[in-house]
Amino acid sequence: MAVRKGLYALGWCGAASLGLALAGCGHSAGESKAKAETAPKPVPVTVAALEHRAVERTVEVVGTLNGWEDVTVGTKTQGRVLKVHHDMGDRIKPGALLVELDPVDADLSIQQAQRRLQAELAKLGLKEMPKKEFDVTSVPSVVQAKVALDRAKQNLVRERSLNRRGAGAAQDLQNSENDELAAEAALANAILNAQATLASAQASLTAVDVAIQARADTEIRAPLLFARPAGVTGEIEYAVSKRSVAEGEMLKQGDPVFELVVENPLRLWANVPESHCAEIAVGQTVRVNVASHPGTAFDGKVVRINPAVDAVSRTFQVEVLVPNSRGLLRPGGFAKASILTDRNAMASVVPIESVIKFAGVTKLFVIEQDKARSINVETGHEGSGWVEVIGKLPKEAQVVTTGQTQLANATPVTIRKPEAGAPAEATTASTAPAGEGEATK
């Protein structure tokens, strides 16, 4: 009986141990199954290789287009407007007649000055102003004084001869000497008067020239251009941008009458940030774009650089010469410009759909050991289907082009081939929880 109880106890203990063993095995199998079920599944993605290619480096600026020359034409003399020859929008050549003033007063001034000149010339015995240096000893008054001096000298010689022989009176000799001195003074005075008359005649001739110039000033003309812009071979023209005068109006000296502008070429004045001082140089190519001609780039060239930096805006001014032979650009217009600083700069580029932008963060994912790694980047030059990225990227990397919305850092991935004709996945992750969590790190 005792033996049976022992065997029964032994059997119970064995059963209990076996049950515990079986229970432990069942718990381990459940944990493994649970871990297998909760482990993240690889996300299928498509990838593209990081490329390195030559790109153009540019500095983007904005500015105002100005005429090569902007001129406000005024009147040099006062007068009443007789005729206006042009109006706003006309194209005129340098020297073209713009406005005529009433010339009556100017014509009378010319006649008056000419009469004064004739009167002065008549005193000199001339009909016109001599072209060479004039000898005043040929003037009649000077000749008369010279003859009187010769007569006085002859009388003095005769009186001295009589006085030596004792036949002449001392008073007569003294009178002859005085007559000679007076004749010499009269000759000198006649020469001075002739010189003064000659100077007055020259002044009258200048007055005639002034009157003639005043008459010419009644015809207001477009100014002449003595400097030609580089690269322009055609004829320079002005465009009338404003007319400020009407026929019959009374003008004062200096009043503006027209505003003219040279449309070809134009000057683009733009302010460049101080940080680009070392990149900008004279002669660099500039591409100019305006809102009135979208999609059309106008080529220009840097011609001047202001050596001083503005202390308030921390920018320096650059002048770009922009040819405008077709007249498509307008002075005073707003323009955007790209200054080409380097044509063959090496850059890292990726497909544009691989870049994610969210909450002010720009990033992309690269594949490392079958896992995704997030890298913050900055974008640069953009082309057709690709964009330059700047950041701590491996030299050779595979970037994710689709599936980014399901990725976070260290997410397992599986690379699949893109389906033909499949649309690219959106580049923003504003609705993806995983992407959102990663972007805000």
Image (tube, rainbow, N blue to C red):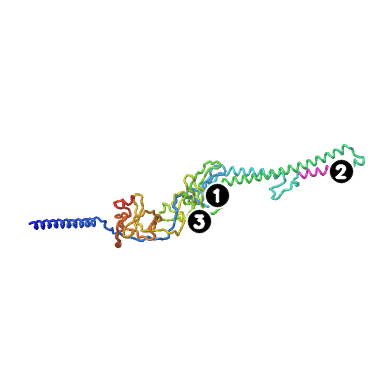
Identity of the residue drawn at 87% across and 43% down: 157
Q: Earlier in the sequence, mark 3 or mark 1?
A: 1
Rendered image: mark on residue 223: 1
Measured as percent of width and height from the top left, residue 306 is found at 51, 49
Task: Look at label 1 and name its amino acid.
Answer: Pro
Crowdedness of circle 3 by 10 Å Cα count: few (<14), some, many (20+)? few
Q: Which mark is residue 123?
A: none
The span from disc 1 to disc 2 (Cα, nearest Å) is 71 Å
**Residue type at tag 2:** Val
Q: Nearer the viewer, residue 56 or 14?
A: 14
Q: Secondary structure at mark 1?
A: loop
Asked if labels 2 and 3 touch by Cβ distance under 8 angstroms, the answer is: no
| Residue tagged 3 | 283
Single out the residue that lies furthest toward the left: 1
Instruction: Quickly name the residue at label 2.
Output: 157
| Tag 1 and tag 2, C-beta contact below 8 Å | no
Q: Which amino acid type is marked by label 3?
A: Gly
Disc 2: CA contacts within 10 A as few (<14), some (14-19) or many (>=20): some
Residue 331 visible at all:
no
Q: Name the N-terminal-most of marks 3 and 2.
A: 2
What is the x, y in percent for residue 281?
50, 54
Q: Secondary structure at mark 2?
A: helix
Neighbor class of circle 1 (other Cα within 10 Å; few <14, some 14-19, many 20+) is some
Instruction: Please say whether residue 301 is one of the residues in the magenta stretch.
Output: no
Direction from residue 2 to residue 408 in the image, left or right: right
Instruction: Specify the segment rendered in magenta.
Output: 142-156
Say what secondary structure mark 3 lies in.
loop
Q: Mark 3 or 2, which is nearer the eye?
A: 3
Does the rendering let one see residue 297? yes
User: Which image quadrant: the N terminus?
Assistant: bottom left
